[in-house]
Image (tube, helix red, strand yellow):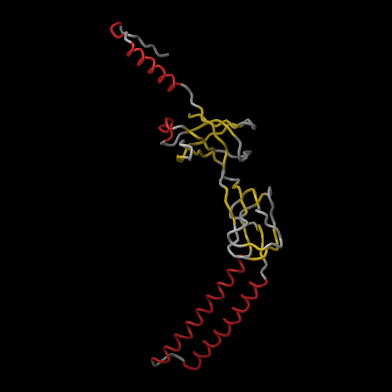
């Protein structure tokens, strides 16, 4: 308990104002501060890197997905035909290169050296064309880069034609929840360095320990603090709660 005495020689109005302001500051510092927040996680958008016709959609809104799991597939017929053509051209160019080596052997003059360099360049270009065609075939399959929950498949259904900029699949990362708080500017000094927190999550009656991390401003003139959680099992995106500094 704190006791403050007022000297008889300082009973002025100005002193009383300062006195009561000091009392308010002391009470504020001694009180347990509570910061309201919400459980959040990273949301990513996954898109096809090429245009094409959708033939398979494996996941829909509300489905859980594992990292590396197939989400959707584009028609590969034309892409496979292009790959087969490039492979055929490669075999032809490679054969011509081998024949040149058998006929000419190790170059002994400048003209033969230049001709061999030309054949080598044609072979290298053919290899690159095959690699690019193979990459496009692989791009026709869209895989999830994270484990999470499908929030929106953006109307992705078999039969529609899509472009790289359209129809993103939104995935909520389910294994990395964090607690996000909105604080006033006056509370910034308490979060300039990491603080240990206790968070009470409403609705599921769960208490979690954590630590404050990054601080950044928002568009409302306040500040956002993110806190890592020691245990995120049983949590859901959007659950609200309160945090106290320990």
Residue 169, image quadrant: bottom right
Instruction: Name the residue nearer the viewer: 194 or 137.
Output: 137
Towards the viewer: 89 or 220: 220
Kindly indicate the quadrant of the structure image that contains residue 241.
Answer: top right
Of all residues, the one furthest to the left in this rendering is 9
Q: Count how many numbered circles sit on residues in the image.
A: 0
Q: Position of residue 196 (x, y in %)?
A: 48, 33
In the rendered image, the vertical position of residue 83 relative to residue 217, given as above or below: below
- The percent position of residue 12, horizontal first and vertical second, equals 32, 9
Name the residue: 42% across, 88% down. Answer: 114
Give the x, y percent position of residue 81: 65, 75
Of 56 and 198, the residue lying toward us? 56
| Residue 189 sits above or below residue 237 on the image | above
User: In the rendered image of this protein, does residue 177 appear above or below residue 33?
Assistant: below
Q: Residue placed at 55% from the left, 72% from the top?
A: 132
**Picture quadrant where residue 111 is located:** bottom left
Q: Locate the N terminus and report the quarter of the image it occupies.
A: top left
How far across and down, in percent of the image, does residue 190 sit? 42, 32
């Amino acid at each position: 308990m704190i006791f403050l005495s007022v000297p008889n020689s300082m009973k002025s109005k100005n002193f009383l104002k300062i006195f009561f302001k000091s009392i308010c500051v002391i009470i504020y510092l001694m009180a347990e501060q509570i910061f309201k927040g919400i459980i959040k996680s990273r949301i990513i958008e996954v898109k096809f890197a090429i245009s094409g016709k959708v033939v398979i959609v494996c996941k829909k809104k509300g489905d859980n997905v594992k990292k590396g799991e197939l989400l959707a597939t584009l028609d590969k017929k034309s892409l496979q035909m292009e790959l087969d053509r490039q492979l055929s051209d490669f075999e032809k160019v490679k054969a011509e290169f081998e024949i040149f080596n058998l006929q000419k052997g190790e170059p002994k003059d400048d003209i033969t050296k230049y001709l061999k360099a030309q054949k080598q360049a044609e072979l290298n270009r053919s290899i690159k064309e095959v690699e690019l065609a193979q990459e496009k075939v692989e791009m026709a399959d869209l895989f999830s880069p994270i484990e999470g929950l499908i929030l929106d498949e953006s109307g992705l259904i078999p039969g529609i034609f899509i472009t790289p900029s359209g129809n993103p699949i939104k995935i909520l990362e389910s294994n990395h929840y964090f607690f996000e708080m909105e604080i006033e500017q006056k509370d910034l000094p308490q979060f300039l360095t990491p603080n240990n927190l206790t968070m009470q999550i409403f609705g599921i009656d769960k208490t979690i320990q954590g630590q404050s991390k990054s601080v950044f401003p928002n568009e409302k003139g306040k500040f956002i603090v993110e806190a890592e959680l020691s245990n995120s099992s049983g949590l859901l995106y959007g659950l609200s709660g309160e945090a106290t500094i320990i």
